[in-house]
Image (cartoon, rainbow, N blue to C red):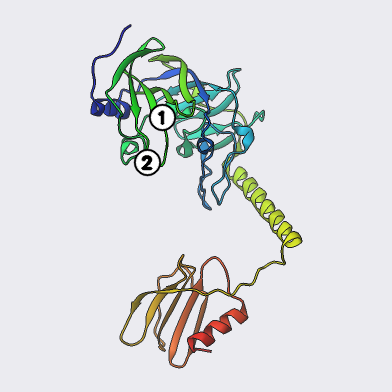
Amino acid sequence: MTTPGAISWVGLLTLMVDGPDLPVRGMISSREGDDESQHYFGWTAFAGDPVPVFAGFAAAVDVEAGVEPPEEHIPEEPVLTRVWRSGRRVRLEHPDGRPTLIVGDELCWRFRGDDPVPVESPSRVVVYQGNGTGLLHRREADGFTGEDFTRPTGPIGETTFLGRPAYTVELAPPAHKPYPIQLVVDAETGLVLQQRNDGFGAVDEWTEIVVGEQADDRLFSWDGPVRPEADERAELEQEWQAEQAERAEWFRANVAPLPLRLELDLGVHVHVHESDGSFEASIGESHLGSLARRPSSEDDWPLGWSEVQHRWSADGWDWALSIHDDQLTEAGLLRLKQTLGGA
């Protein structure tokens, strides 16, 4: 058996992070284990941001909140993905040749189901996560800081994997996880050829790999019809709004009328106060809102808040109030002014 020379953990880290960037092609197999937490992940795409493209999942993400891929995207059998990678450019296909994701230098094209028209997005939003696609992505240096699978449990081993010299290492889990993970690292490129969690029975691995073969540039481009990412975002927003409306209607029908009216006891965290009686404060433990006052004045009052919903003056004071995300009713605002002595 041909094996590489001995290497230290620091040397292996350097190889994984900074190894030679050679073109590769082959097949990746991904078998999920028994750890339910590995099947789900959350992601948030705020208004105006492109929707992330997860290389290993066809499911889209909600626009304003992180979501979990639905159960139909959790395969019981290993998932096989045919792959090409040349620098930043990547092509992923089903074993039968149907493309699932094409990543060019500037743009990417994601195919969903049997739809022959892909969604076009900036290539910078691609996230190599799910169904073993993390094996395509060179490990980042900051991924080996902290306690989350960053310390070997023993010495670096040597092996041969798919006929290629490779290193083996087991990484200890953090305190909140039960099992270590096992890596097989290509000695030439530093790419992870296999990542296992033997405790859960999960395995991501290359089942075929060719290194150094130049790929046809046409593999990483698409000249057919496309759906703009903005159209998908609008569709996702519409679906999200419809779902929220349906859930609200269920609440009205089965629980209580909406909107709910609550009376809360809220703490106040004073950030700054002055000898003239002026102050700025947060309302509520989770910063539900902001409250400020100053001696009455005609001068501008720049508070630096993103929004000031209510301003009033009474008894020699100017007041400012903002309740984040929600609004006080007129009766609620009057009650607060009475409490503050400014009604």
Amino acid carrying label 2: it is Ala
Answer yes or no: do the residues labelled 1 and 2 have beta carbons within 8 Å?
A: no
The tally of labels here is 2
Residue labelled with disc 1: 137
Instruction: Answer with left or right where residue 3 lies relative to residue 57.
Output: left
Q: Which residue: 31% across, 22% down?
A: 20
Return the disc, 1 or 2, that comes first in the chain's sequence.
1
Task: Residue at 73%, 62% (x, y): give it.
Answer: 252
Quarter holding the N terminus? Answer: top left
Q: Is residue 95 left or right of residue 201?
A: right
Q: Which residue is mark 2?
A: 175
Location of residue 274 with respect to 180 vertically, above or below: below
Viewer-nearest residue: 228 or 94: 94
Q: CA distance from mark 1 to mark 2?
A: 26 Å
Residue reaching furthest to the right? 253
Frontmost of labels 1 and 2 is 2
Whether residue 302 is visible here, answered yes or no, is no
Which quadrant would residue 276 be assigned to in this image? bottom left
Q: Is residue 260 above or below residue 27?
A: below
| Amino acid carrying mark 1 in the image | His
Q: Nearer the viewer, residue 197 or 322?
A: 197
Residue shown at 28% from the left, 13% from the top: 4
10 Å crowding of disc 1: few (<14), some (14-19), many (20+) = some
Secondary structure under the numbered disc 1 in the rendered image: loop
Badge 2: how crowded within 10 Å, few (<14), some, or many (20+)? Answer: few
Left or right? Give the position of 176 relative to 111.
left
Residue 90 x %, y %? 47, 26
User: Please, what secondary structure does the residue beneath circle 2 have?
Assistant: loop
Give the residue displayed 53% in from the left and 87% down from the top: 338
Measuring from the top left, give residue 51's x and y in whole percent.
53, 43
